[in-house]
Image: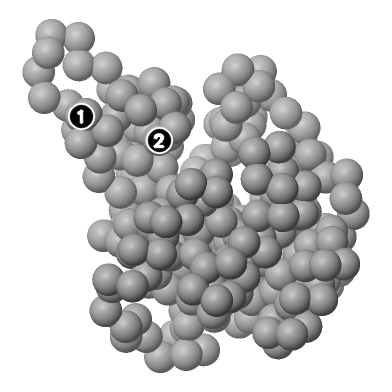
Amino acid sequence: MALPFKAWGIIPARYASSRFPGKPLAEILGRPMFVHVYERARRSPALEGVVLATDSRRIAAAAERYAVPWVMTRPDHPSGTDRVLEAARLLDLDEDAVVVNIQGDEPALHPEMLTGLVAPFARPEVQVATLVSPLTGAEAANPDLVKVVCDRQGRALYFSRAPIPFPRDGQPGTFLRHIGLYAFRMPALERFVALGPGTLEVIEKLEQLRLLENGMAIHVVETRHQSIGVDRPADIAAVVRRLQAENPIEETPS
């Protein structure tokens, strides 16, 4: 894939987690979860490379065993995006590079999701992009599924845990589920971290609102693929069923 920039995938993987300590090392079909994420991400032809960013010697040791490139980052980052920026700096990425924040708890992601996420950066005005997929009205009521509404140019207007747009008169609504994968140009990533948490971000517990509060546009890309995030140990069973049931990914390795 010939693109006028280089895109790098970075997988933040911290050991500590209030709901699931050691989550990146959780075994799924005989391998740590982060290995599934890495192997799928590197199949996207849009990415120059994929690197694990961790704060744990145990995770780093596992990465060595599975030949996953890694960098050691500080343990005190307030968010995965902060960790991604430190890793991008350690990798000495160019100012015109696109950095993809690949959530380490998405072991069922499809490589085409990353390829689609990076594609809008062929347009120089795009600074930040993220993914969405269609959502049913019943699913929209779930606060664990983040919703987004967009303008006519495909830019995010707002993200919320509430069902948006709200169907006041009971008419059928069209909902979009936010998928927590982001791509940034390096200057936009630097600015995001420098801004610090915003009011809406703190209220909704959604860090992407920091960008909207500060007038930074987020380009939204719809994908036909669905993934399953792992928030708690109980989620692993659903991931295993998905991985066992799906067809082999037909992608050309990068």
- Image coordinates for residue 18, horizontal then vertical, percent: 71, 37
Distance between mark 2 and mark 1 Cα atoms: 12 Å
Report if residue 13 is visible in the image: yes
Q: Which residue is mark 1?
A: 137
Residue at figure coordinates x 44%, y 32% from the top left: 144
Q: What secondary structure is marked by label 2?
A: loop
Q: At which x and y percent is residue 199? A: 66, 18
Q: Nearer the viewer, residue 76 or 28?
A: 28
Residue at 20% x, 36% y is 136
Disc 2 designates what residue?
145
Find out whether the residues at labels 2 and 1 contact each other: C-beta distance under 8 Å: no
Q: Is residue 35 left or right of residue 165?
A: right
The answer to which quarter of the image holds residue 34 is bottom right
Q: Amino acid at mark 1?
A: Gly
> Percent position (x, y) of residue 201?
62, 25
Residue 123 visible in image:
no
